[in-house]
Amino acid sequence: MPNRAEGDDPQATALKLLVVLARAHAAVETHLQVNVAAHGLTLTEFAILEVLFHKGPLLLGEVQRRILVSSGGVTYLVDRLEEKDLVERRACPDDRRARYAALTPKGEALIGRIFPDHARMITEVMSALPLGEQRKATDLLRTLGHSAAARPLL
């Protein structure tokens, strides 16, 4: 098969995009991990605290959907955050089988203190792109994500 220039080869272009996207994600994620590790948290623990901080108490299934972990993963993570006295489980008045996750006062104080610095760090890392390009990248990646999610799995 003739070697076409990357710009003319849809497969080579798609593979290059995947590699660049993965490397960019890994580089940004490293900054996020270092930032939250300084507070004794993993990224997924931080994600739970952050979603509860911004959304209030949520059913465990909703926490799972918002931070993209398995149901067993969210149970394990909430257990760990309970051990640290940062999150508590609450009964659901409408369904005895369902449980809410909610911040404890200690968890609320921690995330309230560290989130502003975390958001500033993200803003700084993303500033490699001007705001207009950040918006464009967001739109493009959203389109890519929705399209990939809608495709049947092979």
Image: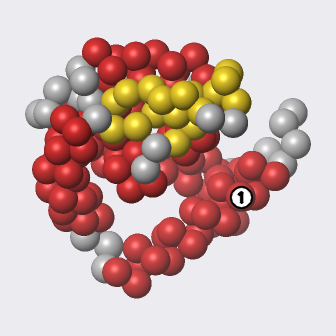
Q: Report how many numbered discs are placed on residues in the image.
A: 1
> Outermost residue, bottom direction?
132
Q: How is the image coloured?
A: secondary structure
**Residue 20 image position (x, y, % from top left):** 46, 51
Q: Quadrant of the N terminus?
A: top right
Q: Quadrant of the C terminus?
A: top right
Q: Residue at x 60, y 33 (%)?
A: 92
> Outermost residue, front direction?
93
**Residue 128 image position (x, y, % from top left):** 26, 68
**Residue 81 image position (x, y, % from top left):** 32, 24
Q: Residue at x 57, y 62 (%)?
A: 141
Q: Residues within 10 Å of mark 1 (few under 14, many from 20)?
A: few
Asked which quadrant contains residue 130, the reply is bottom left
In the rendered view, tell whether residue 146 sits above or below residue 19: below
In the rendered view, tell whether residue 14 sits above or below residue 36: below
Q: Nearer the viewer, residue 85 or 46?
A: 85
Q: Is residue 147 left or right of residue 115?
A: right
Is there any visible trace of residue 67 in the rendered image?
Answer: yes
Asked which quadrant contains residue 37, the reply is top left
State the SS at label 1: helix
Give the amino acid at mark 1. Answer: His
Q: Residue at x 61, y 47 (%)?
A: 15
Q: Nearer the viewer, residue 53 or 93?
A: 93
Q: Nearer the viewer, residue 97 or 147?
A: 97
Is there any visible trace of residue 20 in the rendered image?
Answer: no
**Residue 82 image position (x, y, % from top left):** 33, 21
Q: Nearer the viewer, residue 103 or 66?
A: 103
Q: Residue at x 75, y 58 (%)?
A: 147
In the rendered view, tell whether residue 58 sits above or below residue 39: below
Task: Identify the residue under disc 1.
Answer: 146
